Image: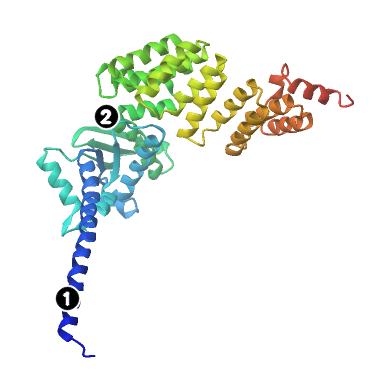
Amino acid sequence: MKLNIHALIGKIEKLENWLSKLFFIIAKPIAIFSVIFTIIPIAKSVFDQRYIIEPLKMPMYFEESGMTGDLASLELSDQLNIIMSKGWSLSGLELVERSKQEIVEDVVIFDISLNSVKALFRYSLGIENKSISGTLFKSGEALFLSISVSGENTITLSKNLKEIESEYSALTNLTSEAALLILHKIDPFVLASYYWSTEETTKSIELAKEIIHKKGKDSANAFLLWGEILNQQGEYNLAIEKFQESLKIKPTMSLAYNAIGNIHLNTGEYSASIEYFRDAVKYRSNLTDAWFQWGAALYFLDDYKGAIRKFNHTLSLDRNYHAAYNEMSYAYANLKDMKKAEEAVMEAITLAPDNPLYHGTLAEHLWSNNKRIQAFKAIEKAAALGLQIEQYQALEPYSTYLAKQENPIN
């Protein structure tokens, strides 16, 4: 049999053409996705609230002692990030040191750096670059720090070196104070929420009032924060007023509806609370707290099956929401299904084994199911984890357990 060289070459050429087309079909979407995933971060960063922290300027003698401008800006960045980690920004505020910015954005794709692409976009849209810069200098026995945000409103702070053990300690104190003033200027809600998280409620309310007075973009959230502080202080009517004010500004604010519902729940107005929880999940269907509290309201209205449905929905959104398992166990207990009651609370214990309340719940269900010895063991576990069982001495199995402790013979 003769080998047809021309036919073989033709087949090879056809195979090469087919493989080229296949490669193009596969490579084309990959290239498109690569471009998309490259462009999206750039597009987002064009409009974000990003401030570049420039290296602080300082006299040469500081740098000779090892305190460089980059190290000083890092100290300022650390102080800003400490505050932001405890507060939260609703405007996507991001603070980046110049050195880190250059590492990320000077990546070159298609012979063009991301930094250049972003700069071109911002320039064409008339968006100014935002920065935080400053100067550290010494005069007499004092260390001074001047900070400027985007070239405006210079803030000057000072520390007497006689009262501080070292220049580095003085720098830390100065950057800590500067961080508060910077955030007050560029994102006051971050600072307001920071003060709330650190329980400095007077300062938090003062900043919330300031945001509201200036009719800032975070006014609705400022009312929400103010209302939450009042709620924690037991000023329920005043808290509801603030939550209602936030809803006037933003009628779809699910957290405000949820907060009002929670107050009604805690004050025993269960039917009223449900209306607000319903509105909360209407505008934010995955708000697990609202679904859970709706279930709690139904439980207190003796609608145990309805409560179980809401607790299950809570768990469908967050399988780790262990409180839903615990409360569901009480609903099953009221329906006389003690097997499911025990199973539910055991799920809660599996997720949160160190929660003493759940071991107490288990003790109650075991007692109701005539498992007395196991119930006492569960109580002992709860007590070991910190449950003050004396607070429950009017209830079983705690009363019997405490009586046995006082009189072991019986």
Between 2 and 128, the one lying in front of the other is: 2
Q: Residue 384's x, y, as percent?
A: 70, 34
Q: Residue at x 37, y 15 (%)?
A: 243
- Asked if residue 310 shows in the view, the reply is yes
Q: Locate residue 356, reporting x and y percent.
A: 64, 31
Q: Which of marks 1 and 2 is nearer the N terminus?
A: 1
**Residue sitting farthest toward the right:** 409
| Count of labels in the image | 2
**In the orientation shown, which residue stands out farthest toward the front?**
1
Q: Name the residue under label 2.
A: 185
Local packing at callout 1 (Cα closer than 10 Å; few below 14, some 14-19, many 20+) is few
Q: List x then y, in percent, for residue 92.
A: 29, 35
Res 388 → quadrant? top right
Quadrant containing the N terminus is bottom left
The C terminus is located in which quarter?
A: top right
User: As displayed, is residue 355 above or below residue 280?
Assistant: below
Assess disc 2: are there few (<14), some (14-19) or many (≥20) residues with their C-alpha within 10 Å of its C-alpha. few
Where residue 21 sits in the image (x, y, percent)?
A: 18, 65
- Asked if the residue at tag 2 contacts the one at tag 1, i.e. Cβ–Cβ closer than 8 Å, the answer is no
Query: Which residue is rendered at x = 41% and y = 42% of the image?
Result: 169
Q: Above or below — where is 30 with respect to 128?
A: below
Q: Is mark 1 on a helix, strand or loop?
A: helix
Looking at the rendered structure, which numbered label has been put on residue 199? Answer: none
Left/right placement of residue 43 relative to residue 383 reads left
Q: Distance between the residues labelled 1 and 2?
A: 68 Å
Give the amino acid type for the residue marked by disc 1 in the picture. Glu
Which residue is outermost to the bottom?
1
Residue occupied by mark 1: 13
Foreground mark, 1 or 2, reads 1
Question: For the point 35% across and 13% down, which residue is it?
Answer: 244
Tag 2: residue type? Answer: Lys
Residue 62 shows in this picture: no
